[in-house]
Image (cartoon, rainbow, N blue to C red):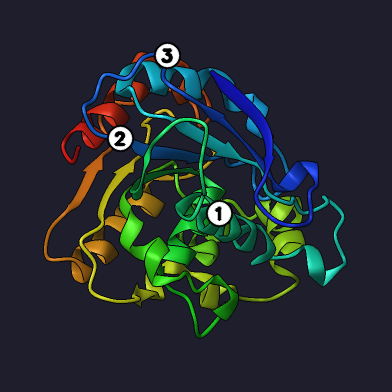
């Protein structure tokens, strides 16, 4: 069963809705965890519908429901601060607050056990919520209920350090960074590599990067892995060897679904 266009804020618009895909038959004696996939797209493109097949593949592999939210996007020629970071991540935080407190969903799931999947720019968004970005973006402070509910994050092809990204891909400044974060000589304050833990946490992280990705360099993932190892005593995993495809093409492979489902199976 699929439910589409569920509003997660009082302002019901197409970019603040989510779709959710339910397993056909329950294969568990207890309610399953919820998987949430947050799309990438350089803070300016993609839609939840683009990832319907991936969601269905994850449902089949895990027997868990999979939710895919939209969020507001930055226009490509943006001069209006209201469409800049942290707007996108604020929407995703509202989505997480909704699903952790969802009353009477049509099918059961354990809203105390949530696994988040982020890709590209959404890896930055989710990290800015789960790590302590409060001195820079206090609006991204999650409730303790949300923090306690997130059992694992799977982040692939992630953007974590904007300045380092621009050093490797200087054309990205005019393509999407300046529109998303505003004009600046440096975006160091938005690097999640400077964010610490919000509170003691047992959340596990899996960082993925494809050797075939030409849009985001593997140095982003290596740096995030090193940073997380300094924050957590355990529960930090990395896989940069199994995926071989281009940035978005990883979703069309069986290996991506297997890596994700095997990781989640460790905890449920």
Give the left or right position of residue 152, taking residue 52 as reference: left
Give the left or right position of residue 16, taking residue 136 as reference: right
Residue, x 33% and y 22% (percent of image)?
63
Q: Which residue is mark 3?
A: 24
Crowding at mark 3 (Cα within 10 Å: few <14, some 14-19, many 20+): few
Q: Quadrant of the C terminus?
A: top left
Q: Is residue 164 above or below residue 137?
A: above
Name the N-terminal-most of marks 2 and 1: 2
**Marking on residue 31:** 2
- Inter-mark Cα distance, 2 to 3: 14 Å
Give the left or right position of residue 107, taking residue 224 as reference: right
Give the left or right position of residue 113, taking residue 126 as reference: left
- Inter-mark Cα distance, 3 to 1: 23 Å
Q: Nearer the viewer, residue 36 or 2?
A: 2
Crowding at mark 1 (Cα within 10 Å: few <14, some 14-19, many 20+): some
Name the N-terminal-most of marks 2 and 3: 3
Where does residue 19 sit, x and y in percent of width and height? 61, 32
Quarter assignment of residue 225: bottom left
């Amino acid at each position: 069963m699929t439910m589409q266009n569920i509003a997660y804020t009082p302002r019901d618009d197409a970019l603040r809705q989510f779709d959710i895909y339910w397993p056909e038959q329950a294969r568990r004696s207890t309610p399953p965890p919820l998987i949430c996939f947050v799309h990438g797209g350089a803070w300016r493109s993609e839609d939840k519908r683009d990832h319907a097949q991936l969601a269905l593949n994850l449902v089949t592999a895990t027997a868990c429901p999979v939710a895919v939210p939209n969020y507001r996007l930055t226009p490509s020629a943006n001069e209006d601060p209201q469409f800049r970071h942290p707007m996108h991540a604020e929407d995703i935080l509202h989505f997480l607050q909704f699903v952790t407190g969802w009353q009477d969903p049509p099918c059961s799931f354990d809203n105390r056990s949530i696994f988040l999947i982020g890709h590209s720019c959404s890896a930055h968004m989710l990290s800015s919520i789960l790590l302590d970005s409060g001195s820079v973006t206090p609006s991204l402070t999650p409730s303790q209920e949300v923090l306690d509910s997130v059992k694992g994050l799977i982040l692939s092809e992630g953007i974590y350090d904007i300045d380092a990204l621009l050093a490797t891909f200087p054309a990205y400044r005019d393509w999407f960074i300046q529109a998303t974060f505003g004009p600046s000589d440096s975006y160091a304050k938005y690097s999640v590599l400077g964010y610490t833990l919000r509170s003691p946490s047992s959340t596990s992280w899996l960082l993925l990067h494809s050797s075939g990705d030409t849009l985001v360099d593997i140095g982003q993932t290596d740096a995030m892995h090193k940073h997380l190892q300094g924050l957590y005593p355990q529960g930090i995993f990395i896989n940069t060897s199994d995926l071989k495809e281009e940035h978005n093409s990883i979703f069309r492979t069986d290996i991506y679904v297997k890596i994700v489902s095997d990781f989640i199976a460790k905890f449920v």
